[in-house]
Amino acid sequence: MGSNFAENHPVAFRFVLRARDNGARILHVDPRFTRTSAMSSDYVPMRSGTDIAFIGALINYVIQNDKFFKEYVVNYTNAPFIVKEEYQDTEDLEGIFSGFDPDKKAYDNASWAYEREDPVEPEGEPANLSERLAREKLAGRPKRDETLQHPRSVFQLMKKHYSRYTPEMVEEICGTSKEEFLMVAETVTANSNPERTTTFCYAMGWTQHTYGVQTIRSGAILQGLLGNMGRPGGGILALRGHANVQGATDLSTLWNSLPGYLDMPAKGAAHDTLEDFLRDKMRPTSFWQNYPKYLVSILKAWYGDAATPANDFAYEALPKTLGNHSHYKMFEEAYNGIIKGMMVIGQNPAVGGQNASFHRKALGKLDWLVVKDPFLIETATFWYEAPEVKNGSVKAEDIGTEVFYLPSTVFAETEGSFTNTSRLLQTKEKAADPPGDCRSDLWFTYELGKRLKELYKDSNAKRDWGFNHLTWDYEPDVNPRFKIQEPSEHKIVKEINGYDVATGAPVAGFGDLQDDGSTACGCWIYSGVLPEESLNRAANREGDDYQYLNWGFAWPANRRNLYNRASARPDGKPWSERKKYIWWDAGKEEWTGYDVPDFAATKAPDTPAVPGGVGLAAQSGKDPFLMNPDGVIQLFAPAGLADGPLPTHYEPPDTPVSKNILYPEQTFSPTAVIFEHLPNNKVHGANNSKYPFVITTYRVTEHHLSGAMTRWLPWLAELMPELFLEISPELASELGVHSKDFVTVETGRGKIEARALVTKRMRPLKVEGKMVHTVGMPIHWGYSGVATGSVPNDLSAIVADPNVYIHSSKAFTCNVKKGRLPGGVV
Amino acid sequence: MLTRREFLKRAGAVTAGATIASVSGINIKPVQAQVSKIKLQVKEGRQVPSVCPYCSVGCGMIITESEGKIINIEGNPDSPLNLGSLCPKGAAAFQLVENDNRPKEVLYRAPHSTSWETKPLDWAMDRIAEKVKEDRDNSFIEKQDGKLVNVNPALASLGGSTLENEWNYIHAKLMRGLGVVNVENHARI
Ligand code: SF4
C-alpha cells in the first residue's frame, strides 16, 4: 500500500517477484493500477487519501474475528496497559480526542497517559549522569491486565475506537468493494502466525498526507496485532526515495534534530542548561536512557578540548530553535525577508516544492542564493526561465536576488557513503577528477568553513566563541592519482564513529560511549562503522544470499532486522522452525541466530525487570522493543504525537466528498496545518464543485524527483520526454479528450498543461453515492533542461502534518479541461 | 590475476580488463541479447566500486576509469542488492558524468541583472563566506524572551538527499556551529 514498488524501486522489486514465484501472495492496494499492480497477485483499488479507513478496518477485522496473535500481543505490545480514566476517545467526542484546544488547534496529551503503580525507590548511588537523571524521572510501572478485558486497557480502547471501521464503511469511504476488502483481510490474517509473516511496503502514498504519520502508525499497529514486527519477512518497510535520504535524516541536516535522532534544544522548552535539556529528553525506562552519553559525545566531537564539564560541554553554543523551522516555514521566512541568504545544495525547490510558484516567489525575495548542483536546475534559472518571467508577469530586472551557481561533481567524482533504505551504509570510491571548477559538496562545505574560520579568527565576541572552537580539521589524505583533493573521508568517518578522547583510538561501538566527556562521537547510531583505524565496515563487500552481514554496515551495530528479539517467543525459543531467526542459546547463555541480535547479548529470557531500575534494567528478558518505554510496541501512543494516540480517518484538505461519514462533525484532521495566509495557497475543502476531480502525483522509473538528475540526460529525456496526465476512459469521454490531446489542469494554486494519457489504469470509484474520478500526474517536469514541461507542483497546496510537517500531494482536487494554456508552455 | 570479487574487496586495486557496457533493467534477457552483439573497443581500465546515486535501493556499480576519464558504468554482479542489474536511471548514470549540459564554471548573477557572468571559483567562495558572515553579524540573536538562544536567523540551508553521509555530517556541524536553525533536506518532503 502507498507505494509503486515496481516503478520506483525496480531493482529491489525483483526480489518481491522472486518471492511471488516461490508462492508468496502479493497484494497491491492503490488508487492507481500501476506496474506494481500488473506484477502482483491481486490489485485492489481505493480512493487516494483513505488509507487509515482501510487499515483501521483491517485492525477492526483482526480484533472482531479474534485473529490477533495472542501470545505476541500480550507480551510484546502495550495492549494490556491501562489508560487513565480521563482519556476520551473520538467515539466519545465525535472525532476528536480528549485534551483538544480548538484555539491552538493542538492537543494536551496529559489524559492519554497510563495508570501507574507507585514508583519504587532505586537502590544505591547512581553510577553516572545518565543514571542520575533517569532516576529523577522514574515513574511507577504502567498497570496491566493480561486478560485484555479491562475496559480501559489499550486493547479494549482500540476495539472501541475501530468498531465502526467495517467493510461496509470501507466501501463507502474508500470506494473499495466489500468483497475485495475481505479478500485482503483474509489473506493478511491467514498469512500472519507463528509459521508465516506478512510485510507492508509503503512509500510517499502513506506519508504525504496531513495525517501521514498516523497512516504509518496504523500499519505498525496492525502489524503489532498480527505479530509481524521484528520477525523475518515482517515489518512495515519504508521504501525511501533518494540514494541517501536515510543518511541525511540520520546525520542530520534537518531543523529539529542533531545526529542520531537527538533533538535540537528549543527556546520554548526547559532547555536552559545541559542538565535541563537532558532531563527533558531522557526516557528512563528504555535504551534512550543513554541519551546523555550520545549528546555529550557529540559536543566533545564538535567542540573538542573547549567542551568541558565546567562549561556544560559547550552546550550553550548550540543554537536553540525559536519555533518550527521546517521546509515550508523556512520558505515563508524567506518570503518575509527574515531569511536573507539560502544555500541550496542538491535540491530543486523551484519546481520540487509544493505550490512551487510560491517557492519561486520566496527565492526572488532573498538577498542572495547559492545553488550547487551538477546542472543548471530551475532553482538557479528561476529568474529568467520561470513561466511567470516568460509570460511577462514578473520581470527579471525586478528580482533582486544575487545568485551564485556552483557546478557540482557527480557521484563518481567523489568518495563517501550512502545509507540505503535498509539502513545499510555502502561506500563508493572516487573514480576520476571532476571537470573544470566542478567541486564536491564536501569540498564546498569544508572550504566554506575554513574561510569563515579565517574571517572570524580575531573575534573575541561571546557569540563567536562556539564557532571559533568548532573542530574543523578534515585536511585531505592526499591521493596522488587525483589533481583535486577531497577532505579526508577517514577523518570524518572516524569522528562520526567516535573515539576515545585520551588515546584517539576509535571506539568499537556505541556501548563504549560515556557521558563524562571521555568519548567523542558524531553520530551514535553509526558508531561501530569504523571500529579500527583501518577498517571502514561500510566498504565491506562480501555478499551472500541471506542477510549479507559482511556487505556494508547496517546501523545500529550492523543489525539487519530491527527488534529481532521478537522473532523468538517470550521464552527465547523460535516461534516456529520455518520463521527461526534469533533465539536464546541456553547452553552458551547468549542470543544467537542469523542476524546481530537486537538485545543485550547475554540477557536471559527469564531475566526479571529490576524494580526501580532504569534503562534496560527496567525491562525484562522478554521485552523486545528496547527503544520504547517499557520495551513493548505502543499500539496506543500515550505521548509523542501531536494528533492523537490512535490513527483516525479524516479527509484530506481537498476532498471530493461532502463530509467524513465516520465523524460528520470532524471532516478534516483537527490538527492539520494549513498555510492559508500564504499567497495563492487556498485549499479547496469538501466537495468543491469548481474542482471536482481527485488528483494524485507520483514518479516514473525514468526520472527522479524534480528531474534535477534526469531531465538533463538525453537518454532519459528521450525515454520519458513529456509531462502527461493519466485519465480514465470514462472521464476522457466526458471531457471529449483523446490520448495526446493537451489538457489544462487547474487548482486554487495554479494552472498547468499536459498531454492526456487515456488509460484504463485510472478507474472511477463510487463514493458517497457518486462516481469520483481520479487523475494522475508524474511530478518530474520543469522549465529548464532537455525534457521540459509545466510544473506539476504548481498545483498543490502547502499544508502539513502536525508531527513532521510533510505535505499532502497524493490526494488533492483539481479541474481538467481540454486545451492548452494561453500561448502554451515554452 | 585477481577475480573480480577479490579485487573489489581490495579498495582501489588496479587491474586490467576489457569491459563491456551492459544495460540491464528488469526485463533482462532481451537487453542482454542486444548488448552481447555490441563489440566495444575498450581500453584497459581501472575498476572502482560505486553505488547508484538515484534511489534508495543502493544498487552496486562498477565504474571503469582510464587515463583519468570514466569510460563505463555498470551494475556490480557481486552486490546482493542488485546482482548486477540496474534500472534505466542507474543504467544512464554514465551520462551524469559525460554530459555536455554540465556547466564547468561558476556562474554569477548580480542583483537585478538579466544575464549570467562566469566567475572564478575562489572569488565565489570568498564572496559567499563574506555574505554568510555579514548576515550573521547583522542578524544574530543571542537572547530572545530572556533566554540564551545563539541563533543566526538570516541563513538557510536546503540540502539534497543524494549527497554523501560525510557531507551531511560536516554540513550539519558547520550550520549548527554558525547558529543556523533553518536546516532542511529532502527527507522532510
Ligand atoms: S539502479 Fe535504479 S533501482 Fe538501483 S539504486 Fe539506481 S535508481 Fe534505484
Image (cartoon, coloured by chain):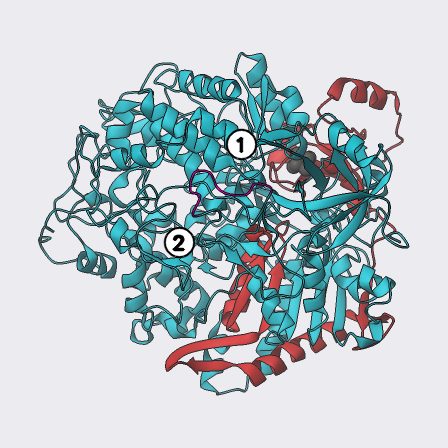
Chain colours: A cyan, B red
Above or below: residue A449 compared with residue A498? below
**Res. A450 image quadrant:** bottom right
Q: Which residue is mark 2?
A: A642
Front position in the image: A792 or A589: A792
Q: Which residues are magenta?
A: A656-665
* Residue A729 or residue A212, whichever sits in front: A729
Coordinates of residue A240 in the picture (x, y in percent): 57, 41
Element type at marker 1? helix
Instruction: Choose top left, top right, bottom left or bottom right for residue A748.
Output: bottom right
x, y percent for residue A91: 33, 41
Which is more toward the observer, A454 or A83?
Answer: A83
Q: Please name the residue shown 38% across and 18% down the image.
A: A579
Horizontally, is A772 left or right of A473 in the view?
right
Amino acid, disc 2: Ala
- Work out whether B11 lies above or below A159: below
Position of residue A271 measured from the top left corner of the image (x, y, whole percent): 34, 69
To which quarter of the image does residue A359 belong? bottom right
Q: Quadrant of the N terminus of chain A?
A: top right
Q: Which mark is residue A174?
A: 1
Q: Residues within 10 Å of mark 2 (few under 14, many from 20)?
A: some
Q: In the displayed structure, does residue B175 sit left or right of residue A706? A: left
Q: Amino acid at mark 1?
A: Cys
CB within 8 Å, label 1 to label 2:
no
Number of the label disc, if any, that sits on residue A294: none
